[in-house]
Image (spheres, rainbow, N blue to C red):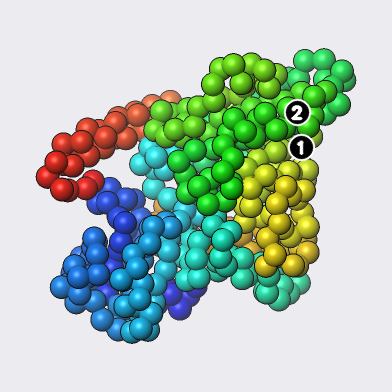
Amino acid sequence: MNDLITDIRNKKLYFFNYAPWRMMQISSFFPVADDRRFICKNLQEALDNGLDKDSIVFIYGIIEFPELEVFVRDNCIPLYRIEDGFIRSVALGSSFAKPYSLCFDSRGIYFDPRKPSDLEYILQNYEFDDELIERAKIVRDMVIESKFSKYNHLEHKEIEIPNRSSYDKVILVTGQVEDDMSIKYGAFGLNNSDLLEMVKKANPNSFIMYKPHPDVLSGNRVGHIAKEITEACANLIVTDISIDSCINACDELHTLTSGAGFDALLRGKKVFTYGMPFYAGWGLTTDYRKCERRTRELSIEKLIASTLILFPTYISPKTNEFCEVEQTLQELKEEQEKYFNNIFYRYWVNFKGYILPRGRKVLRATLKPLGLKF
């Protein structure tokens, strides 16, 4: 990753599938002058702005640009797809919270099991030494102690399970954003309703908690389940409590592809996957499906080393400079404590998280007839 950071600082950078608001969110990861950073719609626009062998191309997410991808391959220009890291921020990305980690992938993208990704390559091939394993143990302890997950704005609270002894076990089912690409490519046609019904059918005597995705609860994304399904399949719906608290209250977590399954593995819980998330197929989860490329059995420390240390790139929440995961975790903890303990700061973050996405929708609707995007 250090080589890429050096290249970022010394080459021209071309971004595709990037609206200006998203570029503002991640600008700290690309510390170059404005005249070396270009947001482009297509190959021709990039060529008009000087795309050549002294360049790097970045595509947000999984969207394909066939002409561009052929050109950069033929001309040996590096291309990376970008996604948020697994420890991201306090507030939601859809609420315009700045990410403190990004994943740069030269092979594919970690949530698309149809083809290899850089993360999958690390998990399948990396030779983990003792020093890295010990470091992974420390990172795991830091995450658990701070009760971290991808987003960290919800209250931590003990969940009481009524008449717990009368149930076989407590199962946590995690909802997801249903138009998210990880669902489109990694869930094999299943959605939140399918998952909840499958879990209930296979576990009729279990207490089932259902936690909708926070982006869905915020109103920023889609993924609600019909009331008749939740009433028939879930004993409890958890909305405004952290995923850490939900995981602590359960015996098992069942999910399509949610990163909450990774959070649960860190906390020593049994995890069942019905799609093919990045952490499935390595002998740590019970999987409804199989990925033939994933033939290695890993320890939880090796999964953590790959997913939280080796693969993502981090910046300091305080300085916006590149750093290691341990520094980001420590400073994110301080920001989280400020969010929970300073009412004015919390109201300000929540206000931005409410008003900015809605303002973006209005602006998009205004600009769309003009052929512009924000």
Q: Is residue 298 visible?
A: yes
Q: Which residue is mark 1?
A: 252
Closer mark to the observer between disc 2 and disc 1: 2
How dense is the environment of label 2, judged by Cα within 10 Å: few (below 14), some, or many (20 and up)?
few
Is 266 or 74 nearer to us in this picture?
A: 74
Is 339 or 63 nearer to us in this picture?
A: 63
Q: Is residue 143 visible?
A: no
Q: Quadrant of residue 69?
A: bottom left
Element under disc 1: strand
For badge 1, the amino acid type reads Glu
Across and down, in percent, residue 336 comes to 51, 39
Instruction: Identify the disc placed on residue 143.
Output: none
Q: Quadrant of residue 333?
A: top right
Residue 48 to residue 152: above or below: below
Across and down, in percent, residue 319 comes to 39, 56
For badge 2, the amino acid type reads Lys
Residue 314 to residue 46: above or below: above
Q: Which residue is mark 2?
A: 201
Drawn side of residue 304 relative to residue 205, left or right? left
**Residue in the picture at 87% in, 20% down:** 165
**Residue in the picture at 87% in, 18% down:** 166
Q: Residue furthest left?
A: 370
Across and down, in percent, residue 24 comes to 29, 52
